[in-house]
Amino acid sequence: METLLRSVLQEKADQLSDKGHILFWTAPDTPMAEAVRMMDEGNVGCLLVMDAGRLVGLLNERDVIRGLSAHGAALGDKPVSDVMSVKPVSVSPSMSVYQAMVECTERRARHLPVLEDGELLGLISIGDLVRLVAKDKEKRISDLMGYIQG
């Protein structure tokens, strides 16, 4: 599939336009209890961790579990920076959907920040990629059925 992530971001933005194109983020010094509450209320599995407009990490569900394992009940008072994934796998908007799926699989990443020249353009999830591939396959099947049926 040669669809580029730039197109996926645009499609995602169009779908979320009625919601204000929300990206969920927090600062590195945010207490974990507040960050987890944000994830719960936003129904998201990941928060971008931003500092002075720059992506410095990701906080995902796996990080929260590891934090609970390491810190127990004290996790709620710890800053996000103690638990977040630093140097998250990021991708370029010129990367194909297929290449992004390979990145997700090889690196066991469910969320990929899309960066261009260090600027955050958006966040792609494995769910976004799977939806796009399924949509593409449905279209191909429909086209082939139309061809076969004349």
Image (cartoon, helix red, strand yellow):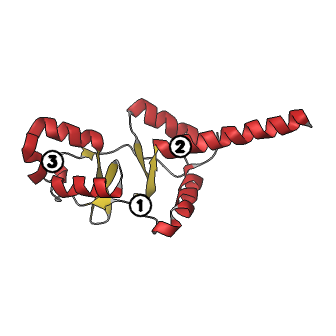
Q: Amino acid at mark 3?
A: Asp
> Which residue is located at x 50 percent, y 33 percent?
102
Quarter of the rendering containing residue 41: bottom left
Between 109 and 17, the residue placed more toward the observer is 17
Per the model, the C-alpha gap separating discs 1 and 2 is: 21 Å
Are the residues tagged 1 and 3 within 8 Å (C-beta)?
no
Local secondary structure at mark 3: helix
Q: Which residue is denoted by mark 2 in the rendering? A: 129
Local secondary structure at mark 2: helix
Query: For mark 3, does the 10 Å Cα neighbourhood hold few (<14), some (14 to 19), or many (20 or more) residues?
Result: some
Q: Is residue 96 visible?
A: no
Q: Is residue 110 visible?
A: yes
Above or below for 10 versus 127: below
Nearest-to-viewer mark from 2 and 3: 2
Q: Position of residue 3 (x, y in %)?
A: 63, 46
Q: Which residue is denoted by mark 1 in the rendering? A: 119
Q: Position of residue 9 (x, y in %)?
A: 53, 56
Point out the residue furthest to the right here: 150
Q: Amino acid at mark 1?
A: Glu
Q: Amino acid at mark 2?
A: Leu
Query: For mark 1, does the 10 Å Cα neighbourhood hold few (<14), some (14 to 19), or many (20 or more) residues?
Result: few
Q: Return the disc, 2 or 3, that comes first in the chain's sequence.
A: 3
> Which residue is located at x 19 percent, y 52 percent?
80
Disc marking residue 82:
3
> Which residue is located at x 7 percent, y 46 percent?
74
Q: Quadrant of the C terminus?
A: top right
Are the residues tagged 1 and 2 within 8 Å (C-beta)?
no
Point out the residue furthest to the top here: 106
Q: Return the disc, 1 or 3, that comes first in the chain's sequence.
A: 3
